Image (cartoon, helix red, strand yellow):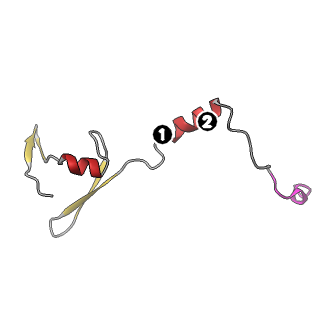
Amino acid sequence: MEATLIKMGESVGFRIPESFVNDFNLKAGTRVNINFSHDKEFAFSNLSKVREGWDVAFAQYAMNGEDKQMLPDFFDTETDSFL
């Protein structure tokens, strides 16, 4: 991809083409990590959180009563006698 730097307020930036935005699931507000190399090239990666939204999903799961314990606290009752 080729882009031209443009003035953005007191900063300089570039526009990312829509096809690139769609391919990499980017949107306004997406946090990215920018890495610069010694030969003046850079790469960026999406910093979206892998578990983003899990808190809401698990809260809904609990509200639906689906959070019952499926496994016992101890698998081996023999170890209980030592505690």
Name the residue located 75 percent from the left edge and 46 percent from the top edge.
70
Return the mark for residue 53: 1
Residues under numbered marks 2 and 1 in contact, where contact means CB atoms less than 8 Å apart: no
Magenta-colored segment: predominant secondary structure: loop
Q: Mark 2 highlights which residue?
A: 61
Give 46 or 81, whichever is nearer the viewer. 46
x and y percent of residue 66 in the render? 68, 36
Name the residue located 52 percent from the left edge and 41 percent from the top edge.
54
Name the residue located 82 percent from the left edge and 56 percent from the top edge.
75
Give 28 or 35, whichever is nearer the viewer. 28
**In terms of sequence position, does the residue under pointer 2 or pointer 1 come before the other?**
1
Residue neighbourhood size for the residue with mark 2, other residues' Cα within 10 Å, grouped as few (<14), some (14–19), many (≥20): few
Mark 1 falls on what kind of element? Answer: loop
Mark 2 falls on what kind of element? Answer: helix
Give 23 or 44, whichever is nearer the viewer. 23
Relative height, residue 47 to residue 36 (above, below): above
Name the residue located 8 percent from the left edge and 50 percent from the top edge.
5
Relative height, residue 45 to residue 60 (above, below): below
Q: Amino acid at mark 1?
A: Gly
Which marked residue is nearer to the observer: mark 2 or mark 1?
A: 2
* In the displayed structure image, the side of residue 9 where residue 27 appears, left or right: right
* In the displayed structure image, the side of residue 59 where residue 38 appears, left or right: left
Give 23 or 59, whichever is nearer the viewer. 23
Q: Quadrant of the N terminus?
A: bottom left
* In the displayed structure image, the side of residue 72 where residue 28 appears, left or right: left
Q: Amino acid at mark 2?
A: Tyr
x and y percent of residue 62 in the render? 64, 34
* In the displayed structure image, the side of residue 83 where residue 13 appears, left or right: left
Magenta part of the chain: 74-83
Residue 37 found in image quarter: bottom left
Q: Look at the image and say whether residue 75 sits in the magenta stretch.
A: yes
